[in-house]
């Protein structure tokens, strides 16, 4: 009989909170008007050539990636993957509309604050659902899979944070080519999301998951 995972309740909590915060973070990004994160830049670029609403387009793009991830590495597919697939785009729309109703149009200082909140929330959310190990978003699965394959550049193995930076840059470039609005927020997230996600995993989510278990984590 398969032994019950004693950390499962914590992992489910991490995954759920992480996905909710990921959706909220997108609302902050959009209301800041400094450019969205690299993946949303890609989807926004696609929205310029595919005339359907953002939530539905986001779901369809993720569904296409899900097929790719299924053949690359099924380990990254789980409950978090499907929460992201079916709900995150709509959660982002809801968050953006809610923030617009509460705060209206922001002055420069407010936009900077919203950008900072969006970046921190996005990276913190990713750290939570990475650590939960109950599946990740289809976009996150691809750099994680590439990182697991230990790619090398100039004879040195590239760590996850570098692979993530490269994948973010590719999404940004493609999105901009397709006419998506990019800004300082897009550049910042493309360069720093990987390191900041790694920081939150190391200092917050992984220690919390292991707390009270003698250091053993799944």
Image (tube, rainbow, N blue to C red):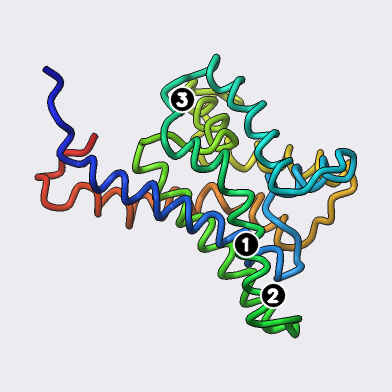
Local secondary structure at mark 3: helix
Asked where in the image residue 1 lies, by quadrant, the reply is: top left
Asked whether the beta carbons under mark 1 and mark 2 sit within 8 Å of each other, the answer is: no
Local secondary structure at mark 1: helix
Q: Which residue is identified by label 3?
A: 148
Q: Which residue is identified by label 1?
A: 94
Q: Is residue 40 left or right of residue 44?
A: left
Q: Is residue 110 left or right of residue 152?
A: right
Marker count (numbered): 3
Local secondary structure at mark 2: helix
Marker disc for residue 178: none
| CA gap, disc 1 and disc 2 | 10 Å
* Residue depicted at x 43% and y 34%: 135
Position in image of residue 143 (x %, y %): 56, 32
* Residue depicted at x 49% and y 42%: 83
Asked whether the beta carbons under mark 3 and mark 2 sit within 8 Å of each other, the answer is: no
Which comes before the other along the chain, label 1 or label 3? 1
- Callout 2: few (<14), some (14-19), or many (20+) C-alpha neighbours within 10 Å? some
Residue 118, above or below 197:
below
- Callout 1: few (<14), some (14-19), or many (20+) C-alpha neighbours within 10 Å? some
Q: Which residue is identified by label 2?
A: 100
């Amino acid at each position: 009989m398969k032994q019950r995972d004693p950390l499962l309740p914590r992992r489910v909590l991490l995954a759920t909170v992480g996905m909710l915060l990921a959706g909220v973070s997108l609302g902050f990004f959009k209301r800041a008007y400094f450019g969205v994160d690299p993946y949303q830049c890609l989807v926004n670029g696609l929205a310029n050539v595919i005339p359907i609403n953002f939530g539905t387009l986001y779901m369809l793009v993720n569904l296409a990636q899900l097929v790719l991830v299924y053949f690359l590495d099924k380990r990254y597919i789980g409950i978090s993957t499907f929460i992201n697939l079916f709900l995150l785009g709509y959660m982002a729309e809801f968050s953006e509309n809610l923030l617009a109703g509460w705060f209206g149009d922001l002055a420069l200082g407010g936009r900077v604050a919203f950008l900072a909140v969006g970046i921190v929330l996005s990276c913190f959310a990713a750290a939570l659902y990475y650590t939960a190990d109950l599946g990740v978003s289809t976009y996150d699965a691809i750099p994680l899979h590439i990182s697991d394959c230990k790619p090398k550049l100039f004879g040195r193995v590239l760590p996850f944070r570098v692979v993530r930076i490269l994948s973010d840059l590719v999404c940004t470039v493609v999105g901009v080519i397709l006419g998506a609005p990019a800004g300082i927020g897009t550049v910042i997230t493309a360069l720093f999301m990987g390191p900041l996600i790694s920081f939150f995993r190391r200092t917050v989510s992984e220690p919390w998951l292991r707390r009270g278990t003698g250091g053993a984590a799944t």
